[in-house]
Image (cartoon, helix red, strand yellow):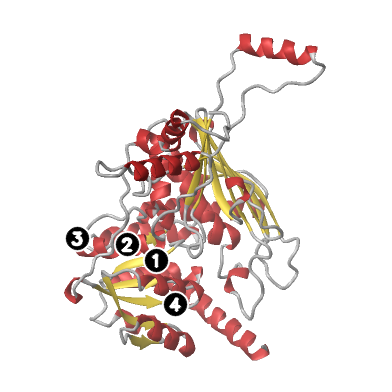
Amino acid sequence: MPDNPNPTRRDIVKAAGAATAAVAVAGLQHAPNILKVHAAADQIKYGVIGLGGRGAYLLKHLQKVDNGRCAAVCDIDDAKMDKAVALAGTSPAKYKDYRELLSDRNVEAVIIAVPLFEHFQITSDTLEAGKHTFCEKSLVFKPEEVHALRTLVPQYPKQILQVGLQRRYSKFYQLAKELVDKGILGDVTHMHALWHRNPGWVMNGFNWRLYRDYSGGLAAELASHQVDVADWIFGGSPEYVIGVGGLDTWKDGRDVFDNIQLIYKYSKGRKLTYSAISTNRHLPILNNTRPEFGELIMGTGGALEITVGDGEATMPTALWYVEPEKVTAQKAESKAATATSAGASYALGGTQRALPIAMATDAFKIGPNDSFLEREKKHAQRWLYGKGIMADDEDRNPVETQMESFFTDCHTGGHPKADLEVDLRDSTCVILSNLCMDQERRVYFNEIDKLRADVTPQKLTADFVAAQSSYMRSLAAKKKVS
């Protein structure tokens, strides 16, 4: 519909239909999330291991999740534990050794938010202790841990294992998946994902994310979230990955790359390109209304720009672009003749206008008892929405949704959306992405089957103890210097 400063009622209704087309075609009805009040007996009693940046963040959002109750916290830092206890408000027990928390019979489920190199061992110990387990991504750090965890988890079928890939719990991302599956975007052939920061991680005291002994770098901490979206949208893992990384800007003692550029090749020629940098925050999607990170899904029938938001001031949102009219060879020749006669080059197709993805909110819903003025107001709101003037964010942080879902599954025996196999595919992606950059070659995903598959559990435990001792010495040394 062309822009019209004085739209008619027909214009408004037509625009309203366009603005809500994505929801109507997908057949989704998203009602506002209503927080239920659970009795203490219905609450899963959980413990949190690791109370640094991510652990504290989770605990803050857990205060808005009513079907779980914090029963214990664990960290090597007393000050962090004291803050966590105050935040929880439930007088949780305090432990410095995670194994003591695992021995607490009052704890039914455990939330693991420790540095990446510790994920596998603590996850394994938590399962063996008979606890339901939620671990932040990635579940594993090394190739041999992929094989070991895939062997271990089936031995504990009554326990829930969920991973912190919260985009799978976002209504916007679930809607994006339905748009793709129902063919609204046509044949989806390409995706672009970006996470641009300035400056990104800095050397503030001792930051474990900056060292390869403990971290998977940008591929693990950032790309893992977005590669998981591509796996979900494309319906499988990549066939191979190529890429280049560099330590080009930050000369502060770190040994992980401060920028990476990757291309993942999926089946049927589909591709994901990925960019993570630490020198500029610009995000060239979503009309430049959001900084840093997001994904672009491109199909023969349209495109979708989407982001999960920052979890604080902004929530997940998306913009939908309908692909312009297809140009046949005959039309192309006609356009070429016109353009050539005018002495100019020509472009095929028309312009695209972003349509926010409407989430069927009550603000736009016209009820049978609405007055004439109320109906007119809602028609006007829809017309504005169709112009991109209004933006409709998700009604709840997906982090809270994923935690609530975890506790529900602990009660009912349900199956998590972000389960073991989802994360092992994602973890494999992280491991092989770093390998392709380090070795400067194309790395195939079936190579994971041969990478240290014969390492024994005893060797993994010994490696963990050695790495943890090294980590503690590094942490102590940095604290002494500061």
Mark 3 sits on what residue?
Answer: 412
Vertical relation: 347 (above or below) 459 = above
Name the secondary structure under disc 2: strand
Amino acid type at circle 4 is: Gly
Return the residue found at the far front: 372
Tag 4 or tag 3, which sits nearer the N-term? 4
Q: Measuring 46% from the left and 72% from the top, which residue is drawn there? A: 57
Q: Horizontally, is 455 left or right of 206 in the view?
A: left
As rendered, which of 137 and 123 lies closer to the eye? 137
Q: Badge 4: few (under 14), some or many (20 or more) residues near its Cα, within 10 Å?
A: many
Q: CA distance from mark 3 to mark 4?
A: 27 Å
Nearer to us of marks 2 and 3 is 3
Between disc 1 and disc 2, whose residue precedes? 1
- N-terminal of the pair, mark 3 or mark 1, is 1
**Residue bearing mark 2:** 161
Crowd around label 1: few <14 · some 14–19 · many ≥20 (10 Å): many
First in sequence: mark 4 vs mark 1: 4
Which residue is at the front of the view, 443 or 279? 279
Residue 221 lies, with reference to residue 288, above or below; the image says: below
Classify 377 as above or below 473.
Answer: above
Disc 2 and disc 3: Cα gap in Å? Answer: 13 Å
Mark found first going from the N terminus, 4 or 2: 4
CB atoms of marks 3 and 1 within 8 Å: no
Return the residue at label 1. 135
**Residue type, label 3:** Thr
